[in-house]
Amino acid sequence: RGGMERHTYDVVVIGAGGAGLRAAIAAQEAGARTAVVCKSLLGKAHTVMAEGGAAAALGNRWPEDSWKVHFRDTMRGGKMLNNWRMAQLHAQEAPERVLELEDWGALFDRTEDGLISQRDFGGHRYARLAHVGDRTGLELIRTLQQRTVQLGIDVFMECTVTDVLKEAGDREGRVAGALAYWRETGRFITFEAPSVILATGGIGKSYKVTSNSWEYTGDGHALALRAGASLINMEFVQFHPTGMVWPPSVKGLLVTESVRGDGGILRNSEGERFMFDYIPDYFRAETADTEEEADRWYDDKKNNRRPPELLPRDEVARAINSEIKAGRGSPHGGIFLDIASRRDADYIRKRLPSMYHQFKELADVDITAEPMEIGPTCHYVMGGVEVDPDTQQSAVTGLYAAGEVSGGMHGSNRLGGNSLSDLLVFGKRAGEAAAAYAVTSGQQGARPVIDEVDVKEAQASALAPFDVAADASGGSENPYTIQQDLQQSMNDLVGIIRTAPELERSLEALRQLKERATRMVVEGHRQYNPGWHLALDLRSMLLVSECIARAALARQESRGGHTRDDFPGPDPGWGAKNLVLTLDASGDGVDITEQALPVMPADLEQLFQDT
Ligand code: FAD
């Protein structure tokens, strides 16, 4: 027993996606001894799946582009609920972060002049996404991983963090480290560190139809709450308009927005290009209102407005949802996405190689010859850990969050491409701040010390599902069934279109699922035991799902990724407020409070008056 594995670092980063690796690089370069801990193999994080590109106002295709236009687009895309300071830093620093990747060996696609190529995406006024075909995430991860290895950063793979540990064992204390277990052996491992950076990504696995992989169970969100930090904007979940709908085994798998950026259009079963019927007033001035103008835009962007297929994702997802509901869907319950009739086969294969193979291999559809069937899929969570915009520190001293797990940057809706740039910009900032704090706390001889009682408690709680098996009292529950029921319930009751009665039903369903989870039984041993891993993931999924449902019920308006059928429009009062979630006194549920949005300075405010 006495032999638990222990390690001491200055900074421990949880997660090896783009945010985690960029943070670790920054922390190590700043002189902090840094480790990265990740639940799966290095290189398999969600970031690797990113297809379209990283948004940055490099101005390579459009010299008129600048951080100010990117900032404005991001805020408008988020329906002005974004933390303005984060949106400003993001727009200002994204170009530097992309160019730095190139210095580190990333090979981006090129313009005719040899500059980094930039492609069009929804909500971005100018072509802005630096990309590598439709496999940008792979190149980003490859580059960051290579740098991580070069710098000698320690990596703990297939190692899941279950708890952030605090100094004094109470919710007021500073961070002192983290508890994790090796997925293969089931043995625990303790990290002692004054700084912990959460970079665990999103929550998509709480939904049945999702583009997210198995790792996206909201662990970082839950770890933050349980450590005493707060979450904001959790009602805002992005449903990407285009996921595969057929065959059932791949339902939800992403079809990149680049298909539309490169000329693809949406049609219903009557052959109608329906997006023209769904242009909201808010974006009318900058959107083409005839097919002729929309089609001219691809060749002459100066003198024409953008096609409505490239409206922000929330608008397009709602429109598709309405068409399907109105009975104008495709045979498998989606809508048609057609690039075959619009671009020649060579162009499609060159620009969209992954999409070509994805449809050929998984659905036996040749996208150069026939339309795809697509429908909305849960894709990204705008909500996350409330952080200081400059340092990414949460409400807990020593606890930082970067990438998808952090909140505020994207407001009520994220623009495509803004996540890869977000995780580079704020990964670096989090790494630097975490390193600076860790080094200072070391110099002052005041490094926080882990409370061993907390470690024992955290272990006991993680092993509880095995004890239930031993008691076998009063029937038992299987983690797989609970997960399926949770995913179905979130899909049906907290999906794209929401209503108060359904949200109330979802909260009741969550209460019952939580109760059933106390009777969850895990068979077998701690050695690689997927049932146990899922039982632990479910603790996060249930808590985070409750945050989403609670916030969705509280926000009585429709804005960005949150659409209430019973409150169809945006409400200026709600537009000035965030919803903040913290763990309640029982430690098993959440409290929700309203918070005034930080006020944007006049010079930035002016940017919205000019257009
Ligand atoms: P991730 O890359 O998911 O990394 C999370 C890490 O945390 C993983 O290493 C995981 O193992 C680890 N982890 C989680 N929980 C634990 C735990 N308890 N203990 C230890 N480790 C843990 N965005 C764009 O900007 N442009 C795009 O073109 C784009 N395309 C996308 C395509 C797809 C198919 C998907 C799904 C998303 C896309 N996105 C895109 C969104 C973007 O990829 C993600 O938001 C982003 O990669 C998240 O990065 P991250 O570093 O925050 O998290």
Image (cartoon, grey):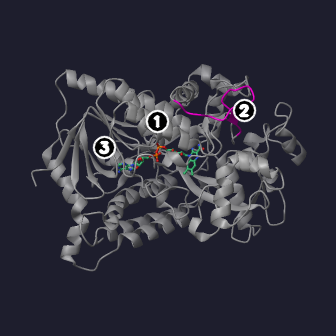
Give amino acid for label 1. Answer: Leu
Q: Residues within 10 Å of mark 1 (few under 14, many from 20)?
A: many
- Occupied quadrant, residue 227: top left
Q: Is residue 424 left or right of residue 563?
A: left
**Residue 492 on the magenta span:** no
Q: Secondary structure at mark 2?
A: loop
| Horizontal side, residue 105 vs residue 560: left or right | left
Residue bearing mark 2: 126
How crowded is the residue under tag 3: few (<14 C-alpha within 10 Å), some, or many (20+)?
A: many
The foreground one among 440 and 560 is 440
| Residue range of the region highlighted in magenta in the rendering | 105-120
- Horizontal side of 191 relative to 30 (left or right) equals left
Residue positioned 74% across, 40% down in the render: 283
Q: Main secondary structure of the magenta part?
A: loop
The span from disc 2 to disc 3 (Cα, nearest Å) is 41 Å
Q: Earlier in the sequence, mark 1 or mark 2?
A: 2
| Residue occupied by mark 1 | 144
Q: Nearer the viewer, residue 255 or 590?
A: 255
Q: CA distance from mark 1 to mark 2?
A: 27 Å
Q: Quadrant of residue 326?
A: bottom right
Upstream in sequence: badge 2 or badge 3 = 2
Quadrant for the C terminus in the image: top right
Q: Residue sitting at 18 percent across and 54 percent down?
A: 457
> Residue at horizontal 47%, vertical 59%?
205
Q: Is residue 118 magenta?
A: yes
Of residue 567 and residue 93, the one placed in the foreground of this image is 93
User: For mark 3, what is the residue?
Assistant: 228
Determine the secondary structure under disc 1.
helix
User: Amino acid type of disc 2?
Assistant: Tyr
CA separation in Å, label 3 and label 1: 31 Å
